[in-house]
Image (cartoon, rainbow, N blue to C red):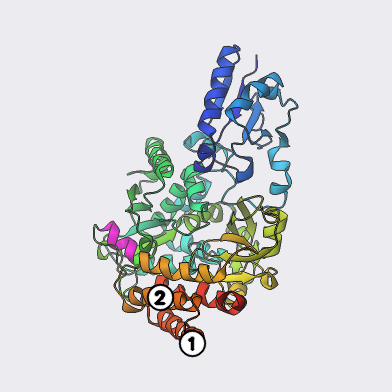
Amino acid sequence: MSIARIFVPRDATALALGADGVAQAIVDTARARGLDVELVRNGSRGMFWLEPLVEVAIDGAGAQDGKRIGYGPVRAADVAGLFDAGFLHGGAHALRLGVVEELDWFGKQERLCFGRVGVTDPLAVADYVAHGGYRGLRNALAMTGAEIVQAVTDSGLRGRGGAAFPTGIKWNTVLATDSEQKYVVCNADEGDSGTFSDRMLMEGDPLCLVEGMTIAGIAVGAAQGYIYLRSEYPHAYRALNAAIANAYEAGWLGADVGGSGRRFDLEVRLGAGAYICGEETSLLESLEGKRGQVRFKPPLPAIKGLFGRPTVINNVISFASVPIVLDRGAAFYRDYGVGRSRGTLPIQLAGNLKRTGLVEKAFGVTLRELLYDWGGGSLSGRPIRAVQVGGPLGAYLPESQFDTVLDYEAFAAVGAMLGHGGIVAFDDTVDLLEQARYAMEFCAAESCGKCTPCRIGSTRGVEVIERIRSNVDREKNLALLDDLCHTMRHGSLCALGGLTPDPVVSALKHFPEDFS
């Protein structure tokens, strides 16, 4: 008698929508009917409007090729009806979606980083290896550090955390700096509004991050790594610790990585909820047990980072992109993308959209395609008036700029930034003056307080926008706001104060009617 494999996500989004209840209902119903099932708690496929998404494979079908029948969104109350419809054999039901990877949502994606997310058991090393895991690290162990760094450099990979700095250059600096102790640190303090790709990967394929960080350690000569995780990610925290423990048990971490005789140890450390600790030097201060405040640069963390030692600091998606570069080669990765933006970007669709979730695309897709082909237009049915890309410090883009392609230089040319790839959509009821005020208020609340332009400027910014809203000396205060934004942009120590003017200035430029 065949045993059906049923996949129910353990991703935080699915859990918030009742996935645990669905999983329990499946187990209870199968037991009551005398049916043998294997329940796998996988990651999310990224189609949030269909969560909880239940997938079914029989006799192992779909375990390797990913062809599984999906049903969604499933509620616990739907489970009995699914069993009645024969869903264990792919039976017809109102919630039946068909083969998941043949859905339009997947058809035009290029899933490199997220190729295993939603497919495998996130914590099972054997499942990870069966789906191509650790091939990149195996190749890296047969190379010199300089050869690994050169491969990363040749791939064109740039930091996915927002700054887009070439990853290979950063690694080469650490490699070339003499020190008895070096560190690898992952910035998993994903605090930007509308972003969740780091969380999804850590919950849905944590071993990919572990492998990427291990490759970094082998490349630069670092034996110790830390994942700095935001405290608001309890599910990711548990998944990472379990995955790390399993990697140690399987010999992929510790004193003899992959039987190579080379050491790499990895730990997870929780932040304390400060947005500023997403800035790399504040993160290092916090990791050392100090108050999270920005450091002066130079020296760069690559030369004098954690505990004063050379340190590689990259974002989750940056590290997660490395295994495929070492597995498939630099040219394979570089062939995706446009211009100087190579590879793929996990794009997070949020806000007023019918279909929110994660899309992984090669650089070169337009905002309009993402908003309408994948996002399905606004949930409210009203026109999309503006989108904010790159988190709470990102510029607001009007409809006239929706044909801008996702490319670091193309966005910079229109006064915007890609940041972490988060896109938040607003319909025509949005008040851009209020959004500009929120940007200043957010900066005031999250400033570390070390520099005056950020600490005081943001507070004054809220006051000036309040006066504009009240029509008090409007023209005078508009000029004052422009001057204040200039001071913050050029006088702040880090990107928090330096980028806060972007949403304000873009709102003023593209939506002046909201300030009248």
Type of residue at label 2?
Answer: Glu
Q: Which residues are magenta?
A: 282-288
Name the residue beneath numbered marker 2.
Answer: 463
Residue 64, horizontal then vertical, whole percent: 63, 35
Q: State the residue in front, 488 or 239.
A: 488
Residue 282, horizontal then vertical, whole percent: 32, 64
- Residue name at image x 67 percent, y 34 percent: 70
Q: Main secondary structure of the magenta part?
A: helix
The answer to which quarter of the image holds residue 405 is: bottom right
Return the disc, 1 or 2, that comes first in the chain's sequence: 2
Name the residue beneath numbered marker 1.
Answer: 479
Residue 365 visible in this rendered orientation of the protein: no
Q: Quadrant of the N terminus?
A: top right
419 in relation to 252, above or below: below
Other-residue count near label 2 (Cα within 10 Å), few / some / many at <14 / 14–19 / ≥20: some
Q: State the residue in front, 58 or 266.
A: 58
Residue 28 visible in this rendered orientation of the protein: yes
Inter-mark Cα distance, 1 to 2: 14 Å
- Dot 1: what SS? helix
Type of residue at label 1?
Answer: Ala
Residue 397, horizontal then vertical, whole percent: 61, 70
The answer to which quarter of the image holds residue 55 is: top right
- Dot 2: what SS? helix
